[in-house]
Amino acid sequence: MSRIIKIGTRDSQLALWQAKTVQNQLESLGYATQLIPVKSTGDLILDKPLYELGITGIFTKTLDVAMLNGSVDIAVHSMKDVPTALPIGIVQAAVLERAATQDILVYKEAPNFEKKATVATGSLRRQAQWLHRYPHHKTVDLRGNVNTRLQKLEDSDWLGAIFAKAGLARIGVLPETYSVLDWMVPAPAQGAMMIAALEKDTYTLAACAQLNHKETALCTHIERTFLRTLEGGCTAPIGAAATLENGHIHFTGVLFAVDGQQKIEVHRTIPESQAIGFGTDCALEILDNGGRELMKEIKKFTQK
């Protein structure tokens, strides 16, 4: 059976770039496709920090509904925005090869980190890690699509604003004035793109499976299992990074207090053959070292 695969996507420039990338790959394999852009709640409500909206999967929920009601066949997401528990009937169809995972600080003038300053970010994870390293700084919320956030930085007196390097590079707006924050642990699955599809749609699942990058799928699975075991939503101050090198998986995971004053971390390396349950084991180490109490405090803050 041959049919058109309807690709659902948010309508921001970055989301459309990601969807078109999937479209091009599917069409190169001989599949017919159609792009269907939609707006998410996360794109429409820009005057509140994400954690205050109290919605898990705020950037993915609209596309989930569109898939379940048959308006689209697949949804393309930045994987870090996808809740670790997918809705009933929806499954992970593929993970594309990962791009850069690093966070970067974009600035107008060379920053002086010693002085008191303000840094912009819409992420509790980035906020907590920045304040942990620079407790004399303050952070402000920054929302909107990539271009909107870059313009807000241009119009501000901030020291800089924090972005995911992959997002800016993908749409060709990575400025020359930035620093890689190699000390900042990225969000679980940062830099990866995920395709979601209906569990019962065997035609679409077979098509998407051909785009799956096994190494990226393995590493992001470990990171997201770590996140799920900590019971942290997409807005919690949790970082995770797994890499596969010479048959071994190297993992770093962190949990921060919202104000950055407390940090619990884990660093472990195992053979790839022992990957099953690895993300869970790393999260349990965090929880057993004070993480349970810290997660309770984080939930009080984010559920105010």
Image (cartoon, rainbow, N blue to C red):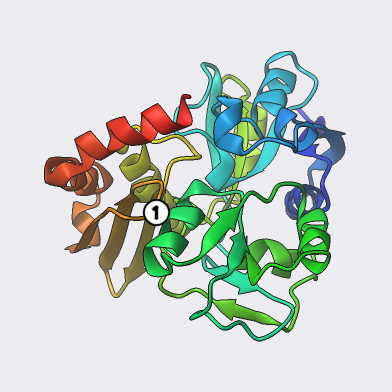
Kindly state the secondary structure of the residue where label 1 is placed: strand
Q: In the picture provided, is 219 more to the left or to the right than 153?
A: left
Q: In the picture provided, is 169 more to the left or to the right than 256?
A: right
Residue projecting furthest to the left: 288
Q: Quadrant of residue 281?
A: top left
For the residue carrying disc 1, how many other residues have a C-alpha within 10 Å: few (<14), some (14-19), or many (20+)?
A: many
Residue projecting furthest to the top: 69
Q: Quadrant of residue 159?
A: bottom right
Q: Which residue is nearer to you in this view: 185 or 213?
A: 185
Q: Is residue 136 above or below residue 26?
A: below
Q: Which residue is nearer to you in this view: 111 or 93?
A: 111
Q: In the picture provided, is 61 more to the left or to the right than 23?
A: left
Q: Residue at x 58, y 41 (%)?
A: 81
Q: Position of residue 114 (x, y in %)?
A: 48, 81
Q: Is residue 215 above or below residue 36?
A: below
Q: Position of residue 302 (x, y in %)?
A: 46, 31
Q: Is residue 149 visible?
A: yes
Residue hosting label 1: 239
Q: Position of residue 253 (x, y in %)?
A: 30, 56
Q: Amino acid at mark 1?
A: Gly
Q: Residue at x 79, y 32 (%)?
A: 44
Q: Which residue is nearer to you in this view: 128 or 5?
A: 128
Q: Residue at x 75, y 38 (%)?
A: 46
Q: Is residue 57 visible?
A: no
Q: Position of residue 152 (x, y in %)?
A: 80, 59
- Screen quadrant of the N terminus: top right
Q: Residue at x 60, y 63 (%)?
A: 119
